[in-house]
């Protein structure tokens, strides 16, 4: 059972025993520094890496049917290598094969050389950064039982040990009475999913007219036609019963199949969890069944171009390329297991949460958004999340399946209270406030009722409807899998070819557009209507100029704590980051994005005038109760002074005679008295005129004229300009 292996540096050695090979006195290093991993292998990877067409796929489970492979990887913590640890030798051992009573049993299985090439990375993207693959091997169970595997790595800092169990089992089918005894509720939910009828619909002619015999492997349970893979899977039962693929897809095909074969039809529990007989024989021992949230498990069927590209698209997304090993509160949005625990946890009969037992080392994989056990929302088994609560208490109920996205793509802050605290390099809404932006809430609003665009209310499935739209026919090969679908991207540019923009979803409302920078409104108030993204970028630059370093279009994020030391600066910075981290440059909600940016700019320049009518919004609200009934050039009280002048003077724009002394505000201005003091009245022998009005005085009036100017009507002092003359 011992096997000679090659380590990552090419050094070969034969593992005899731990003592003989590495020495009894070797330093033992934390076992977590070395691990054995079961790697998935998808149909597309077999093609892409030039493996033979007899290579068997794998879901990456440690529980497999007899005759099915487990592709083993010996992995070392990458930090050790970076810190200078050198691996000089690695070796594997199959230590024992035991039955369900832990009694040793005979087996011909060996740990053999893996067919996977060294150029193939490990499957889960987090592991690609956190670990380095030292060596690969493969084992194919040949008898039912548990295969106890160990591995050691000799390093310059000591010996690393790792152990792993592989379970060889056979398929029993979901309708087994033993399964129903414990999993009746899951069984009932599962029967409502498309997986539960994946074979029935096709064989009865209710699905694709192109359904052929070679499709069966992904529409049934336990199908593996490889020699030696005899494990009571669909192909084994079909052979035993003499069933062959029908010549015609018709209604009664499934009913005419042998009952034993019907038991292995469709995509059942064991398709994802592995064969369950050993799990059953050990009284439900969870170590004898696989629980995986790896996308590779789904990739057994969903990663085979050109018609099954879900995994390929997902692999091009940021979800599929995450490389950061998360822990703590971060797991809720950066790992599949954490997401399910936080947003759609399982419950027992008493209503208590049942935590996920799958690893938290996988990113946002298929099982985060799709419920494998129930129909969820009713569309593609998307999890049925009905509402999302934002940190400020607002609850979003619109958005359909996009609520699954908004469960994570939302701010982590209550903006108003957050900006009262200190600024650090982590300052901001936390990287993805798309839900807040779509709803038009939870930025710094300065006490105003901010306008908001209608995307959330008129696009039924919000995020999903746009970001997961089907790609059009004729998409260039260089963009295949890079836009739409599970790539979640709407645009792609490889730097050489013409950029691709998926605008089909926009057509019904916005008409024919070539990209997402289409026009609509002069949001930055520069007198030109540009594309919405250009408008918002223009506003962001205007705001950046008012943030430290003042006058620069680039924000000094390194000096946040020192330079952003006023409430106005912190509020402006938060809104800038809110729009920046939303990432759409206004497309999600152009009105709201523009309004909060303009408000921040105005506050930093002295006051907010969101409608750009020359009047501070706070003054309009105090005097008129709204921002729309009056503009700066209007004269609301008909006293001859427009609203801008009244705002500068401090007079009441709703009263022609603010101080009630019998003289209108205009008369007092022209007569030289104070319109805010009822004891100050105009001098009958003196009148104040504007410079323009003086030009209309009749000649020969023997009038003494003095020109005066003032820097500010509300705060400045008048001063003579030149000398008096007639």
Image (cartoon, grey):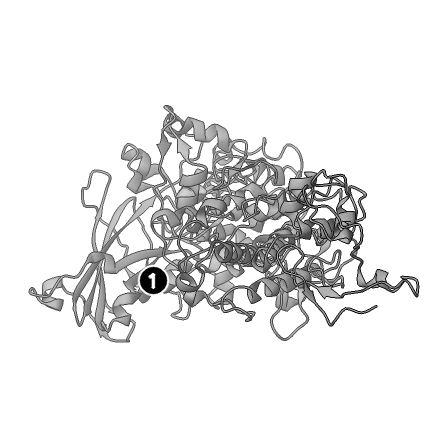
Q: Is residue 566 left or right of residue 64?
A: right
Answer with the quarter of the image where residue 442 lies: top right
Where residue 175 sits in the image (x, y, percent)?
45, 30
Q: Residue at x 66, y 39 (%)?
A: 205
Between 406 and 67, the one nearer to me in the picture: 406
Q: Is residue 554 left or right of residue 172?
A: right
> Which residue is label 1 attached to?
130
Where residue 94 sits in the image (x, y, percent)?
22, 56
Between 546 and 122, the one nearer to me in the picture: 546
Q: Residue furthest right?
A: 699
**Where, quadrant-wise, is the N terminus in this rendering?**
bottom left
Between 203 and 502, the one nearer to me in the picture: 502
* Number of numbered callouts drawn: 1
Residue 294 visible to an observer of this rendering: yes
Answer with the quarter of the image where residue 287 lies: top left
Work out whether 344 lies above or below 526: above
Where residue 529 sits in the image (x, y, percent)?
76, 61
Residue 451 visible to an observer of this rendering: no
**Where, quadrant-wise, is the C terminus in this rendering?**
bottom right
Q: Classify 10 Å Cα crowding around label 1: few (below 14), some (14-19), many (20 and above).
A: some
Q: Residue at x 49, y 33 (%)?
A: 190
Q: Residue at x 34, y 42 (%)?
A: 357
Q: Is residue 333 left or right of residue 480?
A: left
């Amino acid at each position: 059972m011992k096997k000679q292996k090659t380590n990552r540096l090419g050094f070969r050695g034969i593992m005899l025993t731990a003592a003989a090979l590495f020495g009894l006195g070797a330093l033992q290093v934390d076992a977590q520094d070395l691990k054995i991993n079961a790697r998935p292998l998808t149909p597309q990877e077999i093609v892409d890496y030039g493996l033979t067409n007899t290579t068997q796929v794998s879901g990456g489970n440690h529980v497999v049917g007899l005759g099915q492979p487990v592709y083993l990887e010996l992995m070392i913590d990458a930090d050790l290598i970076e810190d200078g640890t050198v691996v000089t030798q690695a070796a594997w051992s199959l230590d024992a094969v035991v039955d369900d009573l832990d009694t040793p049993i005979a087996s011909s299985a060996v740990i053999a050389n893996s067919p996977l090439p060294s150029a193939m990375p490990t499957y889960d993207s987090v592991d690609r950064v956190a670990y380095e693959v030292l060596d690969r091997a493969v084992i194919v169970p040949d008898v039912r039982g548990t295969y106890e595997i160990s591995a050691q790595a000799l390093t310059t800092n000591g010996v690393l040990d790792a152990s792993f169990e592989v379970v060889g089992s056979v398929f029993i089918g979901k309708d087994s009475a033993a399964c129903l005894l414990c999993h009746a509720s899951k069984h009932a939910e599962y029967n409502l999913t498309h997986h539960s009828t994946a074979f029935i619909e096709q064989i009865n002619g209710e699905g694709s007219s192109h359904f052929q015999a070679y499709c069966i492997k992904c529409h049934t349970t336990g199908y593996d036609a490889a020699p030696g893979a005899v494990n009571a899977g669909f192909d084994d039962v079909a052979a035993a019963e003499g069933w062959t693929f029908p010549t015609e897809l018709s209604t009664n095909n499934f009913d005419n199949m042998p009952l034993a074969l019907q038991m292995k039809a469709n995509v059942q529990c064991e398709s994802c969890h592995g064969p369950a007989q050993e799990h059953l024989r050990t009284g439900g021992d969870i170590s004898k069944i696989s629980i995986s949230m790896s996308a590779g498990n789904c990739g057994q069927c969903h990663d085979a171009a050109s018609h099954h590209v879900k995994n390929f698209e997902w692999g091009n997304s940021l979800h599929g390329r995450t490389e950061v090993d998360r822990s703590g509160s971060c797991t809720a949005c950066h790992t599949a297991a954490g997401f399910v625990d936080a947003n759609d946890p399982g419950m027992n009969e008493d209503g208590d949460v049942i935590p996920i037992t799958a690893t938290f080392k996988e990113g946002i994989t298929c099982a985060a958004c799709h419920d494998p056990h129930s129909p969820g929302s009713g569309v593609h088994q998307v999890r049925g999340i009905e509402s999302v609560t934002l940190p400020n208490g607002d609850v979003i109920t619109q958005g359909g399946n996009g609520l699954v996205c908004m469960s994570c793509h939302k701010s982590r802050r209550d903006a108003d209270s957050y900006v009262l605290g200190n600024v650090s390099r982590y300052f901001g809404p936390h990287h993805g406030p798309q839900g807040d932006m779509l709803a038009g809430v939870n930025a710094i609003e300065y006490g105003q009722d901010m306008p908001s665009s209608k995307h959330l209310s008129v696009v039924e499935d919000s995020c999903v409807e746009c970001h997961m739209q089907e790609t059009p026919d004729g998409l260039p090969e260089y963009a295949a899998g890079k836009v739409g679908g599970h790539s979640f991207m709407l645009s792609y540019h490889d730097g050489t070819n013409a950029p691709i923009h998926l605008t089909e979803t926009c057509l019904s409302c916005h008409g024919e557009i070539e990209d997402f920078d289409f026009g609509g409104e002069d949001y930055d108030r520069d007198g030109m209507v540009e594309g919405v993204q250009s408008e918002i970028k223009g506003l962001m630059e205007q705001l950046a100029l008012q943030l430290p370093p003042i006058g620069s279009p680039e924000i000094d994020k390194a000096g946040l704590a020192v330079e952003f030391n006023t409430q106005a600066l912190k509020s402006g910075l938060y809104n800038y980051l809110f729009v920046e981290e939303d990432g759409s440059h206004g497309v999600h909600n152009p009105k709201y994005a523009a309004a909060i940016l303009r408000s921040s700019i105005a506050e930093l320049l002295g006051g907010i005038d969101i409608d750009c009518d020359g009047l501070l919004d706070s003054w309009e609200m105090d005097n008129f109760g709204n921002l729309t009934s009056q503009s700066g050039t209007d004269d609301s009280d008909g006293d001859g002074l427009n609203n801008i002048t009244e705002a500068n003077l401090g007079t009441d724009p709703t009263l022609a005679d603010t101080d009630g002394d019998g003289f209108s505000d205009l008369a007092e201005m022209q007569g030289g008295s104070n319109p805010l003091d009822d004891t100050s009245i105009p001098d009958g022998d003196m009148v104040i005129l504007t410079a323009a009005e003086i030009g209309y005085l009749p000649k020969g009036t023997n009038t003494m004229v003095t020109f005066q100017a003032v820097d500010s009507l509300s705060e400045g002092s008048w001063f003579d300009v030149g000398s008096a003359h007639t």
